[in-house]
Image (cartoon, coloured by chain):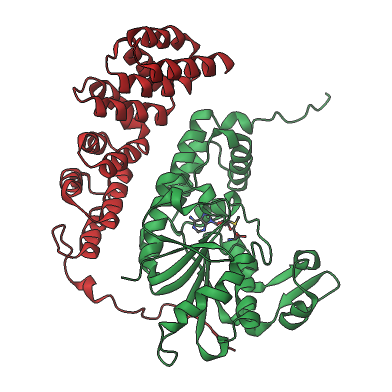
Amino acid sequence: MASSPAPDIGSARISAEDVTVFCDFFYKKTGISMDASRRYFIDRRLEERMAANECRSFREYLSLVKFQPGGAEMQALINEMTVNETYFFREDYQFACLTKRMLDEIADRKDPRRERIRIWSVPCSTGEEPYSIAISILENWPRASQYDIEIIASDIDTRALGRARNGIYQARALHRVPQRVRDTYFRKIDSESWQVVQDLRDSIDFGIVNVSDPVQMARMRGIDVIFCRNLLIYFDDLSRRQTAENFFDALNPGGFVALGHSESMSRISPIFLPRKFPEALVHQRPLA
Amino acid sequence: MGLMKARSGSALPADHSASEAPRLDHPQPMQRRRAVQALTGDPDSVAPLVELLRSEGDNLVRQAAFIALASLNSERAARGVSVLLSDADAALRNGALETLSAMPAHAGALLEPLGRDEDPDVRIFAVLLASELQDDAASTWLLRLAEHEQDANVCSNLAEALGGTDRPEAVPALEAIGRRFPDEPFLAFAVETAVQRLREA
Ligand SMILES: C[S@@+](CC[C@H](N)C(=O)[O-])C[C@H]1O[C@@H](n2cnc3c(N)ncnc32)[C@H](O)[C@@H]1O
């Protein structure tokens, strides 16, 4: 008997209704709003995860995701669904704004003997953004050695965070990094890859944070600058507004938020003051 | 170097006000905002939040209250918020509209009663809401209202809203609006633009 190819039951197992149920659930967990237009992407990821867990139906898989103690499958699913695209010195005019304007304003209000400056890169994806911030400060902010500066870097995706902590990048990922900077802050590990030097890796506090989780967000306080770039594009209006509120609470009065260039705070929430610096438009929590 | 590892899990600057129980009538806005946030997710918070919004002057507190209502995403919340569409304060009306648009599943059912409101301003907000909702039921409702609406300002909003739908069958109702108000040149223009958009779509 001629063997016929295995029937493609994959897509048949996930119905349009399943996708709606899934999108609703995923939105509530993460704030990420996916719609049927991304059906192909969603189906593919779900099928892979269902196969990896030997689930026969979507229902079976969904209850695994919801009720598994420890939440490992929920995490695996999040890691699959997120878009981690990022690169070194992306939208670097904002880092220029940080070292030329924002940090001075913040530093002028602090006593360097007692108070730290705290910067939060969220989402940090695979680390390029927080490392770029750190390097920009060390290279371009003349007062860096007078202050204690903390960089906190968070993401919902644990796999991306693992790569961020390792700090190993392919040579082509460093194309925007000037050679001198590369030779100072990276060390070549083989012909293909470079690793961020240990001191710099150790100075950044990488950790998991879901910005849509109120409990996790309530722990973030006393921040002076938040870089939140290319996250809110995946959210709907309500999650964007909630995130803006949470950032407001996380910031010290006078603290700043920088968003990605396609994200506009004026369309999200009126609670921040727009601050137009020559390098960039950022958003400030009012001082009083 | 100036970079320091953050003290993971270390105590953050203490928020002294946090020990006080939050109250919606606290004299300080930040405390009222905390009280609003503490109500998030509570289905019984609709009435107190709507009442707060009626008298609240602080924008930050208002925003938090609208977000708390939107995140309830319930019929009760939608009905509660819709009452604010007739408030004298334009910012409050706009906030209510935005909040209702964030609850499309429950806001749609309100179009019918809002469309019967005596106050033309409320009917205008209902029209704006319907065009935010962008679904079939909402555009059907717009069509029906266009057939009998007698207020010129509501009609001009209707023309704009219908022009943005994909319902060419709205053309006769639009043209009837033009005939109903022969002395309003701005309406003739609004109708003409809408008809053109529908024909081009
Ligand atoms: C496109 S990357 C942006 C990285 C960097 N900020 C940049 O602009 O290059 C988006 C990241 O958002 C993360 N993400 C998505 N939802 C999140 C959430 N609810 N909380 C925290 N991070 C989230 C994803 O894991 C992904 O790494």
User: Would you say residue B109 is visible in this rendering?
Assistant: yes
Q: Quadrant of residue A221?
A: bottom left
Q: Residue at x 46, y 82 (%)?
A: A107
Shade of chain B as shown in the rendered figure: red
Frontmost residue, B57 versus A151: B57
Q: Is residue A221 left or right of residue A163?
A: left
Coordinates of residue A281 in the picture (x, y in percent): 52, 61
Number of marks present in the image shown: 0
| Quadrant of the drawing holding the N terminus of chain B | bottom right
**Residue at the limit of the structure toward the right, as seen here:** A191
Coordinates of residue B52 in the picture (x, y in percent): 17, 50
Q: Residue at x 43, y 20 (%)?
A: B190
Q: Residue at x 53, y 48 (%)?
A: A234
As displayed, is residue B60 above or below residue A288?
above
As displayed, is residue B40 above or below residue B131?
below
Coordinates of residue A177 in the picture (x, y in percent): 75, 71
Frontmost residue, A29 versus B57: B57
As displayed, is residue B74 above or below residue A149?
above
As displayed, is residue B186 above or below residue A59?
above
Q: Residue at x 31, y 31 (%)?
A: B106
Coordinates of residue A46 in the picture (x, y in percent): 58, 42
Q: Quadrant of residue A213?
A: bottom left
Shade of chain A as shown in the rendered figure: green
